[in-house]
Amino acid sequence: MRDFDDSSLWRISDYERMRMNTGTSGYMKLEGPTVLPTTLMAELNRLDERNAADDALEVMAACMRQREAALLYLQHGHYVWPVTLFPLQMLYHSPREMAPTTVERLDDLKLINIEPPGVRPPGHWMYERVGQAAHYRPLLPLLWLVALRGPRRELLSEIGGTAAYRAIKDPATENLMAPGALGPSVQRLRREAASLRDIASWPGMSLERASRLINALYLAQCLMMTRTNPAARSATGLVGRLLGLGRSRR
């Protein structure tokens, strides 16, 4: 059985056969750490306790909070997408573009495994471990796409609970488009803070659309959240902690 080809995807059946026969994915090629950092593992363990270990968006958010690179195996349709996140460089590596504008549905996206990175980021001194330049792409469009079109319909656990939200910058400056009623909602959030339930009541919005928008703004580092604003109201069934992603990029 061959390793993952650098320019192609594997069918899910081939991926599962490789793991059954060898105990590995076939894509973990680097010498070095064979386990994820303890801080990231702690977050992943908490997700596992909540039966959310296969939630791609939650895992992506954990990688962003910890600023830790990781190789995510994402099942989409009949294929496995090996996607390596590099939060410090705000890039991701994948054999094919995961966030084209033509993608309409990602509601079946599921995390099936996570490992230490199989490639290095561009510019690393171990240049022989760096992948093809064409396979590195901006990370924000991927996070935005998965938040708006992926399977998660509720707020991420870190930003739920009693809170008010405000957009601190326009995601359009990063070429992140908010279609339909999401666009006016972003502009309104730039002028005023609002709770999830209030946002859901705006024209063209719903609880799901509001949750997706807030998740997308959070991952795009465009969100300010407060627990003390008079507009703050509880998001039923969700309890979160204030933990921002707005650290400066390197």
Image: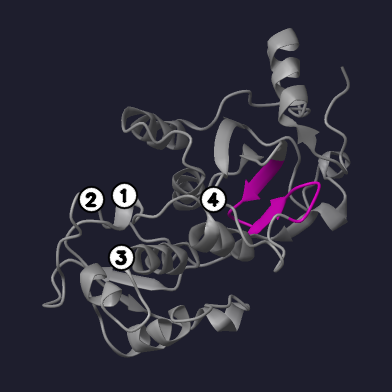
Judging by the rendered image, the residue that carries numbered circle 2 is 238
The mark lying in front, picked from 3 and 2, is 3
The residue wearing badge 1 is 157
The three-letter amino acid code for the residue at tag 2 is Leu
Mark 1–mark 4 Cα distance, whole angstroms, equals 19 Å
Which residue matches tag 4? 107
Q: Is 94 included in the stretch rendered in magenta?
A: yes
Compared across the picture, whether 68 is left or right of 47 comes to right
Residue 74, above or below 139: above
Residues tagged 2 and 1 counted as in contact (Cβ below 8 A): yes
Q: Which mark is residue 207?
A: 3
Distance, label 4 to label 3, CA atoms, is: 17 Å
Q: Earlier in the sequence, mark 3 or mark 2?
A: 3
Viewer-side label of 2, 4:
4
Q: Earlier in the sequence, mark 4 or mark 3?
A: 4
Q: Is residue 109 above or below residue 165?
A: above
> What's the distance in space between the residues labelled 1 and 3, CA to CA?
15 Å
Nearest the camera: 157 or 35?
157
Q: Amino acid at mark 1?
A: Ser
Q: Residues within 10 Å of mark 1 (few under 14, many from 20)?
A: some
SS class of the residue under badge 1? helix
Question: Which residue is located at x 85 percent, y 41 percent?
Answer: 8
* 124 over 171 or under it: above or below: above
Q: Is residue 66 left or right of residue 94?
A: left
The residues bearing labels 2 and 4 have C-alpha atoms spaced at a distance of 21 Å
